[in-house]
Amino acid sequence: MKWLGLAAGVFGVDFAAKRYLERKMKITDEPKELLGGRILIRRYTNEGSIFEKLVGKPKIARNLSTAAFGAVAAGFLRNIGKPGRTLKKLGYSLMLGGGASNFFDRCTRDGVTDYLSVAPKKSGWVRNVVFNLGDVAIFSGLFFATLGILFGKHND
């Protein structure tokens, strides 16, 4: 149950952050700087998929999102009831929560609301990449699930 709670928590935090920024910030507003300008908060709607691929093709983006979310949900269900597998459960829970938040946006809005950028001193193109906490959870989850697959004890 704790793994489903983690997924729900990731969904809830990202969902709340997105709705808060939609109320408080316009897409045209200047980014707000945190940590001396190394983190930027801005509002952006990604109408495509990762790195703006599939812009103008919302049906394809939604179908790919549905397939990816379904695959993550299947992995979560496959591992959740088995003993051990902590890294896999952690990974799939993070991916499920972040994926659910982005999937919800894609199905109910014109795209996914993104709001974070990393801006190191010599940032170049990195400064223009905008993501959300759901994306961070997805990539973190992928990392943990991969560790679990590669190094975990397999109880199949």
Image: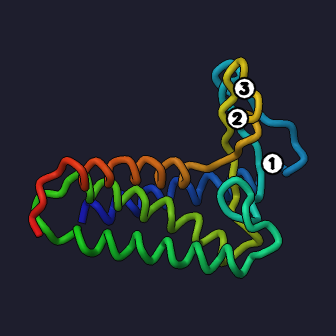
Q: Nearer the viewer, mark 1 or mark 3?
A: 3
Seen in the picture, residue 3 relative to 108 is either above or below; the reply is above
Q: Residue at x 40, y 56 (%)?
A: 94
Q: Position of residue 97 (x, y in %)?
A: 45, 62
Q: Quadrant of residue 122?
A: top right
Left or right of 91? Residue 124 is right
Mark number, residue 123:
3
Q: Amino acid at mark 1?
A: Met
Q: Which residue is mark 1?
A: 25
Asked if disc 3 and disc 2 are in contact, CB closer than 8 Å, the reply is yes
Label 2 SS: helix
Which residue bears the numbered disc 2?
126
Q: Is residue 93 left or right of residue 25?
A: left
Position in image of residue 123 (x %, y %): 72, 26
Q: CA distance from mark 1 to mark 3?
A: 24 Å
Query: What's the residue at 82%, 72% (across, down)?
Result: 56
Instruction: Pick the residue in front: 118 or 115.
Output: 118
Residue that appears at 22% across and 68% down: 79
Q: Residue furthest right?
A: 28
Q: Which amino acid, mark 3?
A: Ser
Q: Earlier in the sequence, mark 1 or mark 2?
A: 1
**For residue 96, which quarter of the picture?**
bottom left
Image side of residue 110 versus residue 67, left or right:
right
